[in-house]
Image (cartoon, rainbow, N blue to C red):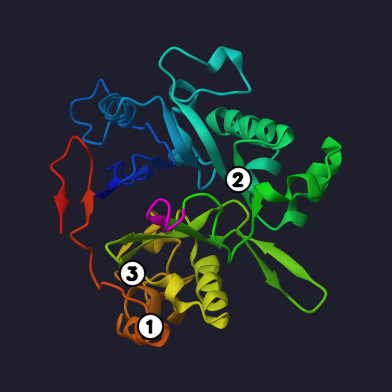
Amino acid sequence: MHKLTFFPLGNADTTLISVENGQDFLFDFANVADPDNPADKRAKVDAELRNYMKSRGKDTFEIVGFTHGDSDHTKGSDEFFHFDRFPSLQGNGRFKIKELWVPAGMIVEKNSEDDARLLRQEARHRLREGYGIRVFSRPQQLADWFESEGISIESRSHLITDAGQIAPGPTLQSGGVEFFVHSPFGHRQDEETVIDRNENCFAFQARFSVDGILTDLLMLSDVEWEFLTAIIDITRNHQHDDRLHWDVCKIPHHCSAFSLNAEKGKTKTTPTDSIDWLYGNRENFQQVKQHNHRTFRPRITTKIKLTKSFSVSGWSQ
């Protein structure tokens, strides 16, 4: 059985996808809870993941993705992960990363601090060496960085995935899951000009297949309303409405503060028309299903377990 685990962290994110074939994909790592404060009910991510990996007899995550470099998505990474770039941050119970997934912003950012800085250096090291990394971007967005490193874009193009593509690696056939990339993306201003948008935020749809039934997870990281609206409009313009379908949606934790509309109401914020379609107008997805002749479930299937945290009683539907 596939399992999705969403750790209750308040204003922070950590999500674990455990697939039936034994692979584990971790997205973001925010060890923000105070272990010395009994009143802090947030999940103790470090301890819970250590116990989980011990129960699996593993020391490696097949994929670790960071949707962006803010501390509420990276805090504590320096003590939890094995960094190939730094011998001083290896061994001693640290967990290895087979493939690191990051948006281009985590490569080109110049002012990263703390955990984000270490992760940037790890990502750059892997990209320089040409292994164990996937960067989400248009290749041209990284042109200046590659030039400064004396590396040709062509020699690393197989490690870069643009929006609108399925990420290489896990497939529905081999692992029961695939990842469709929504962001970062390039917005075509005219025939000659493409502007990179939301370069610091990785958003995607994970599609699971169990016994011929498809179940979709939409992971929106901290995408703000302007970029989310653009993602929806671009995807629909390319007639990929099914890639916006969700049975489970991880909404941006900033919610109505930044993720629904520029204008905020006193007690209720009205989303843009596109965001309202994504979250509220579910009838449209029935048309998507019929049009594409795909088998969807309008709710979580019994083949996927959904849990809030290992320390909290989970639930399945």
For disc 3, the marked residue is: 266
The nearer-to-camera label among 3 and 1 is 1
The range drawn in magenta is 171-177
Q: Residues within 10 Å of mark 3 (few under 14, many from 20)?
A: few
Residue 176, placed above or below residue 237:
above
Select label 2 or label 1 by which is in front.
Answer: 1
Nearer to the camera, 198 or 54: 54
Q: Is residue 155 left or right of residue 57?
A: right
**Real-space Cα distance between discs 2 and 1?**
32 Å
Question: Residue 188 vs residue 211: left or right?
Answer: right
Q: Amino acid at mark 1?
A: His
- Nearer to us in this view, 226 or 219: 219
Q: Position of residue 132 (x, y in %)?
A: 60, 36
- Between 146 and 292, the residue placed more toward the observer is 292
Q: Given the image, on which type of amino acid does mark 2 rest?
A: Arg
SS at badge 3: loop
Q: Nearer the viewer, residue 90 or 273?
A: 90
Q: Is residue 51 magenta?
A: no
Percent across and percent down for residue 166 are: 54, 60
The quadrant the C terminus occupies is bottom left
Residue lying at 84% horizontally and 45% vertically, measured from the top left: 152
Image height of 80 relative to 264, above or below? above
Indicate left or right for 60 with 209 as reference: right
- Per the image, label 1 sits on a secondary structure element best described as loop
**Mark 3: amino acid:** Lys
Disc nearer the start of the sequence (2/1): 2
Residue drawn at x 56%, y 72% as measured from the top left: 230
Q: Position of residue 110 (x, y in %)?
A: 71, 38
The residue that appears at 34% across and 27% down in the rendered structure is 46
What residue would you read off at disc 1?
293
Q: To which residue does mark 2 refer? A: 134
